[in-house]
């Protein structure tokens, strides 16, 4: 009975606060990006050593999405203003996770996190200047 009371309390608390969920945590938020931009940038390679160059190319295709990686949930390394996700969206790097399968997986996940941090910080600076 005590467990049921706790579940009911949290359920009611969640519903009461659902209106106050930030847009970047709301899966119904639709970013302003064309499907053409998404498709074009899916075809581009990622150079882990040059996030600035990748950023320039993606911007030239009008893709202003930030990079998200897996961890204990979804992370946006380097991004300070998460409200920008509401307008510009994000690309999730599949395969990044905190559940590592091997040393190589850990190294690649770390490399993507470093890359995403630099990329997101640069993107935020560019978008903030508009």
Image (tube, helix red, strand yellow):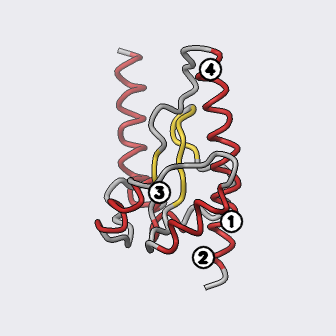
In three-dimensional space, the C-alpha distance between marks 4 and 1, rounded to whole angstroms, equals 27 Å
Residue, x 36% and y 67% (percent of image)? 37
Nearer mark to the viewer, of 4 and 1:
4
Q: Is residue 58 above or below residue 69?
A: below
Q: Disc 4 vs disc 1: Cβ atoms closer than 8 Å?
A: no
Q: Disc 1 vs disc 2: Cβ atoms closer than 8 Å?
A: no
The kind of secondary structure element at disc 1 is helix
Which is more toward the observer, 5 or 68? Answer: 68
The image shows residue 93 at horizontal and vertical percentages of: 48, 42
Instruction: Say whether residue 10 is left or right of residue 124.
Output: left
| Of pointers 3 and 1, the one earlier in the residue sequence | 3
The kind of secondary structure element at disc 2 is helix
In three-dimensional space, the C-alpha distance between marks 2 and 3, rounded to whole angstroms, equals 14 Å
| Of pointers 4 and 1, the one earlier in the residue sequence | 4
Disc 4 marks which residue? 104
Question: Quadrant location of the N terminus?
Answer: top left
Disc 2 marks which residue? 127
Which is more toward the observer, 57 or 9? Answer: 57
């Amino acid at each position: 009975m005590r467990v049921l009371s706790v579940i009911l309390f949290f359920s009611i608390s969640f519903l009461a606060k659902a209106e106050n969920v930030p847009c970047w945590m709301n899966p119904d938020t639709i970013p302003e990006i064309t499907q053409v931009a998404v498709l074009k940038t899916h075809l581009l390679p990622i150079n882990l050593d040059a996030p600035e160059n990748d950023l320039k190319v993606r911007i030239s295709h009008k893709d202003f999405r930030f990079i998200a990686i897996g961890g204990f949930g979804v992370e946006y390394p380097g991004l300070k203003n998460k409200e920008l996700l509401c307008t510009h969206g994000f690309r999730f790097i599949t395969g990044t996770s905190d559940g590592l399968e091997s040393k190589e997986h850990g190294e690649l996940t770390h490399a993507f996190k470093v890359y995403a941090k630099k990329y997101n910080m640069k993107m935020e600076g560019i978008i903030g200047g508009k």
